[in-house]
Amino acid sequence: MSKFIPHTRLRKEVLDLFLEAQNEITIVSPYIKLSSELKKILEEKKSIKDFKIQVLFGKNENDPSKSLSFEDLNFLKGFSNLDVFYQENLHAKYYANEDKSIITSLNLYEFSLKNNIEVGVLLERKFLSILGDNAMDSEVFDYFDLIFSKSEPVFRQNKEQRKNMLGMSISSELKIIVDYTRDYYSSKMTKEKIIHFGFCIRTGEKIPFNLERPFSPEAFKSWNQYKNKDFKEKYCHYSGKLSNGQTTFSKPILVKYWAKAMS
């Protein structure tokens, strides 16, 4: 059965989906902020053997902690079967347990749950049906499964069964498969994904920082007619300050800013 969920019922339907989960929960949301109510629901799931949570978050490529806080990630690490992935282009929102799923406009964010006008569609699985909603639900599940496979793993762990010589399980051991937490919550994102900006040495407008081409596209066309590397320009490529002719194509940064620009 599928049904439309208006904003007046959406919060309850999402919380019910988490509350009713017995085996697994899938969370797909660019922004995730676990409310105390949702944490309480999830805390009770930790006692269920082999309970699994998979999470896909995104956006804020310069600071992923704004999309999923380090505190909430640590809370999720309390589940022995956990997969957390990152997708910088994510905008979709999807929540599912083993029996039903919700496709929605709603981020899993406390403010959004309580205040925003959001809508969704609920898909419920029927064991005796192979068509209709079940087929649609399977199509949606397969789609998001593909998105997970194309996303970057941040943290993965599960319980690995230890067996005796007869092949019988004698114990289980928590095993961390992937842990790039430090990379996503420290310097990696700032070093690799922040675009460093500079200024056109002829017009002063903001452009990507590039010592080999310290011009805006239009200014470069003008300079390229004569290609005089020592022609005196007006601005510092690093600071954007007036250079009074002390900058050129060959020396686009004022001397006093050079060390800072190269650090």
Image (spheres, rainbow, N blue to C red):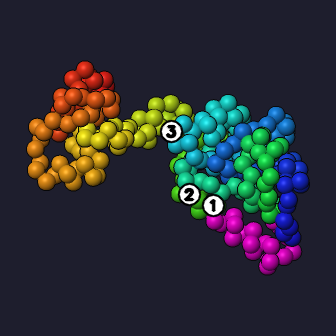
Give x and y (percent) for residue 108: 74, 46
Tell me the element at label 2: helix
Tell me the element at label 1: helix
Q: CA distance from mark 1 to mark 3?
A: 25 Å
The answer to whether residue 170 shows anywhere in this view is no
Q: Nearer the viewer, residue 260 or 110?
A: 260
Q: Is residue 228 left or right of residue 93?
A: left
The answer to whether residue 224 shows anywhere in this view is yes
Question: Does label 2 or label 3 sit earlier along the sequence?
Answer: 3
Quarter of the picture containing the C terminus is: top left
Q: Is residue 113 left or right of residue 76?
A: right
Q: CA distance from mark 1 to mark 2?
A: 6 Å
Q: Specify the quadrant of the image occupied by residue 257.
A: top left
Q: Nearer the viewer, mark 1 or mark 3?
A: 3
Give x and y (percent) for residue 80: 70, 40
Give x and y (percent) for residue 65: 60, 35
Q: Is residue 250 left or right of residue 190?
A: left
Range drawn in magenta: 123-143
Callout 3 amino acid: Asn
Question: Does label 1 or label 3 sit earlier along the sequence?
Answer: 3
Residue bearing the label numbered 3:
62
Disc 2: CA contacts within 10 A as few (<14), some (14-19) or many (>=20): few
Callout 2 amino acid: Ser
Q: Nearer the viewer, residue 237 or 183?
A: 237
Residue at position x 85%, y 61% from top?
Answer: 5
Residue bearing the label numbered 2:
149
Residue at position x 89%, y 54% from top?
Answer: 9
Q: Is residue 240 above or below residue 163?
A: above
Q: Nearer the viewer, residue 10 or 127?
A: 10
Label number found at residue 145: 1
Callout 1 amino acid: Asp
Q: Is residue 92 magenta?
A: no
